[in-house]
Image (cartoon, rainbow, N blue to C red):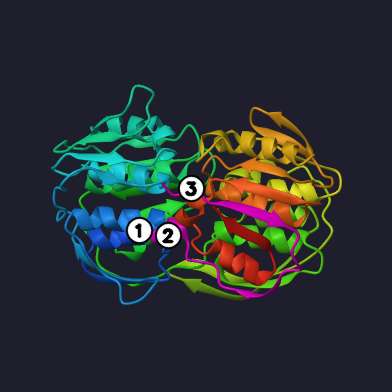
Amino acid sequence: MTSQPYWIARKGSALQGTLAIPGDKSISHRAVMFAALADGVSHIEGFLEGEDTRATASIFAQMGVRFETPSASQRIVHGVGVDGLQAPQGTLDCGNAGTGMRLLAGLLAAQPFDTVLVGDESLSKRPMRRVTGPLAQMGARIDTRGDGTPPLHIHGGQPLQGIHYELPVASAQVKSAVLLAGLYAQGETTVVEPHPTRDYTESMLRAYGAEIEFEPGRARLRGGQRLRATDIAVPADFSSAAFFIVAASVIPGSHVRLRSVGLNPRRTGLLTALRLMGADISEENHAEHGGEPVADLVVRYAPLHGAEIPEAVVPDMIDEFPALFVAAAAASGQTAVRGAAELRVKESDRLAAMATGLRSLGLRVDETDDGATIHGGPLGSGTIESHGDHRISMAFAIAGQLSTGEVRINDVANVATSFPGFDTLATGAGFGLEVLR
């Protein structure tokens, strides 16, 4: 049996160069889904070659959708139409992809056949009632474990009705699941959010020809529409770029350019937070890819200071908090985060994992139910348990660059789910990082 890979992170050199970050994971998931449901052939450029997104493509292949891969990061998708999916043989494995599972729940609830969605050990612990609840209101029948976790047994042949749904907690995944079910439902479906989340699903549905009305915090579409094939260029993933944005901000002498990064305003709260802390981040070469704003991000080292992170930006940076915690560790003074309870139900309890990890490196962290106060200071050596969470692993790879010794990061295999080749890109840019077994 092969032993689990781990990293040894230690002080490297200043980060330099122009870096190509892999394609956006959220957009890659959706591009595959909507291309599969469209009438005609769609071309996807910049597709993320990660385990999560490949799992989503594989699921649609099991349901009769044909894919071609002319080269890495390209997909040609032969859509079967909204009514053309076929019953799969066996279970559908989402791997580590919470986005894949939650969006598929909405889509598969409307199919004429039964399906079972499963995931890896981490995904199998994640809450699904926030999705199955509103879908049940639409008429779906989805069984979970007693505690609301996967696998999801989805009963086909259920007629769905459009609903007006007000999310109790802002979540792009829940919103998207309801809208996908709404595509098949009788009447109109409206989703209202307590705080606007990323609008990838709405923008992409429109790109694929659906009539949908949306504005920040609200979306509405009518059921019974068809989608038409289109070509999508996937921008570089902001959440992946976040690790190099923070690393270049905190490693003295660094100066990097990150090319064509997606800058959806519902994703870029980290830029607001880091600039509050004194970071030197500029945007150049603004453009649009597949309806999404993109730009080159130029990041130079700057001494950071602690700050109170406004709660209003928290939903716009929920995946970037592990990286932010390391920025806070490197800053002078205290950084306080509140309103981030969502972090406790990600791939791991990210608040607890980051607080525990930073404490093990000698830092003071005061944890609360929905956030933490990080007291900046020097980082020592130690061993980090990533709990199989890719973002915890990559965050502590940055911490290792600031350590007086070595930081061992256990259980890093899941980095491949969102950022294949992270270690190669990082060491090429100047990180001190070894992959060991």
Look at the numbered disc 1 and give the secondary structure of its residue: helix
The amino acid on which the numbered mark 2 sits, given as a three-letter code, is Gly
At horizontal 34% and vertical 47% (from top left) the residue drawn is 94
Name the one closer to the observer, 266 or 403: 403
| Mark sitting earlier along the chain (1/3) | 3
Relative to 370, say whether 183 is above or below: below
Residue neighbourhood size for the residue with mark 1, other residues' Cα within 10 Å, grouped as few (<14), some (14–19), many (≥20): some
Mark number for residue 50? 2
The residue range painted magenta reads 1-30
Q: Tell me which corner region of the image, top left, top right, bottom left or bottom right, holds residue 152.
A: top left
Cβ–Cβ below 8 Å for labels 2 and 1?
Answer: yes
Q: Which residue is mark 3?
A: 3
186 sits to left or right of 253: left
Q: Which residue is mark 1?
A: 54
Inspect the image, locate mark 3, and give the three-letter code of the amino acid beneath it: Ser
Q: Nearer the viewer, mark 1 or mark 3?
A: 3
SS category of the residue bearing label 3 = loop
Under circle 2, the secondary element is loop
